[in-house]
Image (tube, grey):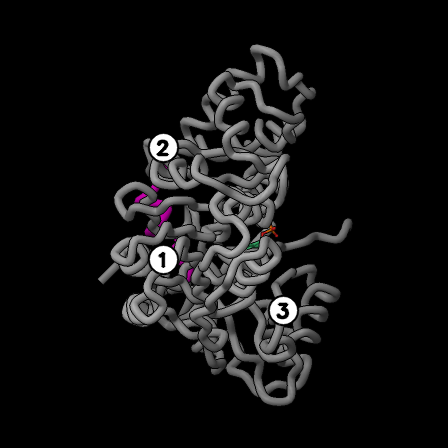
């Protein structure tokens, strides 16, 4: 039999069959009425998922392109910005902002810690304010989902713009672009939006547009103003990843048909199931043991087992693809992603594979307990 793969990474993620079908349709031209209809619907659906009445710009790039667009459109060299970082992707904001010449103050936590609004408020007080605060909603490298609502309120109180990396969280955990006054929210097609890699999405608030008009760094491809003008006519400035957009339109339709609140609840239950299974086999969690951790479950590898070796062995022997640890967590943790097109039986597949492979590698773990614990936990609705 052809080798089967089971993808449990926090991006890219599996794509529903309806989306795969859409991806296989003949290519349409991006300056045609066929495209305009799909693009227009896709933008409307994105605004619904973002919960915004403002603009959502779409770029053909990975999520990092969307992040770069926020830095280049909202800052100019010498601007003071604060970056809240507690892992790999928070640190990416700091690198990007430094690259564009910003004076970066990093509110830096150890990987795995949860940033707090109080710490941010205090730092902004000490600094006497900042132009922009860059934050990460779901820190995919650690499994922590931050209290972006609280962080945003602290940033706004200090008069700063607030930019959120929601690449791995949009569509999986609650995020309210307008109600939380988020000035720019960046996401990507290949995560909870159940589409292939290739598109970055960025919401832009009215306050952010004021800042864009005031001044900025050099930019061309990622110029927000041109993107907005051209999107208004459903006529993108540059050739977009047409097929990925066609797929994203279908995927967003599926997400909205499920209902955003229902999708958030499903993700919370998936996280709960995964954590229950991990604990039942006797492993320790690295990500927080709470319902907010609905994106990726990070697990500490048992003593004597290198998590990278576990991930590689799982892939080689069983076709199960998990994510290893990054940066200081390399070799120490492994991560099970559960955003987008997942149900309880995906979680049990991943857990059963981990159980089997760990025991083959000689770890002392409880065999046979994880699947039952996961299914039981999945059944529980929010308490
Ligand atoms: N931010 C977060 C939180 C992510 O999870 C990722 C992708 N893993 C990125 C940014 C970067 O996205 P991309 O790889 O699409 O550039």
In the rendered view of the protein, which quadrant contains the C terminus?
bottom left
The earlier-in-sequence mark between 3 and 2 is 2
Residue 206, position as x, y percentages in the image: 34, 36
The answer to whether residue 13 is above or below residue 9 is above
Q: Nearer the viewer, mark 1 or mark 3?
A: 3
Q: Residue furthest top?
A: 33
Q: Residue at x 41, y 32 (%)?
A: 55
The answer to whether residue 345 is above or below residue 85 is above
| Secondary structure at numbered mark 2 | loop
Q: Residues within 10 Å of mark 1 (few under 14, many from 20)?
A: many
Q: Which residue is mark 1?
A: 268
> Magenta stretch mostly in which secondary structure?
helix
The residue lying toward the viewer, choosing from 335 and 44, is 44
Q: Residue at x 59, y 53 (%)?
A: 100
Total marks placed: 3
The answer to whether residue 378 is above or below residue 229 is below
Give the quadrant of ligand 1: bottom right
Q: Which residue is mark 2?
A: 54
Query: Which range of residues does the magenta coloring cover?
Result: 257-271
The earlier-in-sequence mark between 1 and 2 is 2
Cα gap from disc 3 to disc 2, whole angstroms: 37 Å
| Secondary structure at numbered mark 1 | helix
In the rendered image, residue 270 lying in the magenta stretch gets the answer yes
Q: Residue at x 36, y 68 (%)?
A: 127
Cα gap from disc 1 to disc 2, whole angstroms: 28 Å
The residue lying toward the viewer, choosing from 99 and 52, is 99
Asked if the residue under mark 2 is in contact with the one under mark 1, i.e. CB atoms within 8 Å, the reply is no
């Amino acid at each position: 039999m052809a080798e089967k793969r089971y993808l449990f990474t926090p991006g890219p993620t599996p794509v529903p069959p309806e989306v795969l079908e859409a991806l296989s349709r003949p290519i349409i031209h991006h300056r045609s009425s066929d495209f305009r209809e799909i693009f227009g619907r896709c933008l409307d659906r994105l605004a619904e998922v973002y919960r915004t009445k403002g603009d959502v710009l779409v770029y053909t790039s990975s999520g990092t392109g969307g992040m770069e667009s926020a830095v280049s459109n909202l800052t100019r060299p010498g601007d003071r910005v604060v970056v809240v970082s507690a892992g790999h992707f928070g640190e990416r904001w700091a690198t990007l902002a430094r690259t564009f010449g910003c004076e970066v103050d990093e509110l830096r936590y150890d990987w795995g810690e949860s940033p707090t609004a109080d710490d941010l408020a205090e730092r902004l007080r000490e600094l006497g304010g900042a132009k922009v605060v860059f934050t990460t909603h779901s820190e995919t490298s650690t499994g922590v989902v931050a209290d972006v609502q609280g962080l945003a309120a602290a940033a706004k109180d200090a008069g700063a713009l607030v930019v959120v990396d929601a690449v791995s969280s949009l569509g999986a955990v609650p995020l309210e672009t307008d109600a939380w006054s988020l000035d720019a929210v960046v996401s990507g097609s290949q995560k909870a939006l159940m589409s292939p890699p290739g598109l970055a999405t960025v919401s832009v608030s009215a306050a952010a547009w004021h800042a864009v008009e005031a001044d900025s760094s050099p930019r061309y491809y990622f110029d927000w103003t041109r993107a907005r003008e051209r999107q208004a006519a459903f006529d993108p400035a540059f050739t977009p990843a047409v097929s990925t957009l066609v797929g994203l339109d279908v995927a967003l339709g599926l997400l909205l048909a499920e209902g955003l609140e229902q999708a958030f609840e499903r993700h919370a239950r998936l996280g709960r199931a995964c954590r229950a299974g991990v604990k039942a086999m006797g492993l320790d969690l690295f990500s927080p043991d709470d319902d907010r951790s609905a994106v990726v479950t990070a697990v500490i590898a048992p003593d004597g087992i290198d998590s990278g070796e576990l991930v590689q062995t799982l892939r080689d022997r069983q076709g199960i693809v998990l994510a290893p640890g990054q940066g200081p967590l390399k070799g120490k943790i492994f991560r099970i992603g559960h955003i987008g097109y997942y149900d309880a039986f995906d979680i049990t597949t991943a857990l059963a594979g981990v159980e089997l492979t760990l025991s083959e590698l000689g770890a002392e773990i409880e065999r046979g307990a994880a699947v039952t614990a996961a299914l039981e936990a999945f059944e529980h609705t929010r308490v």
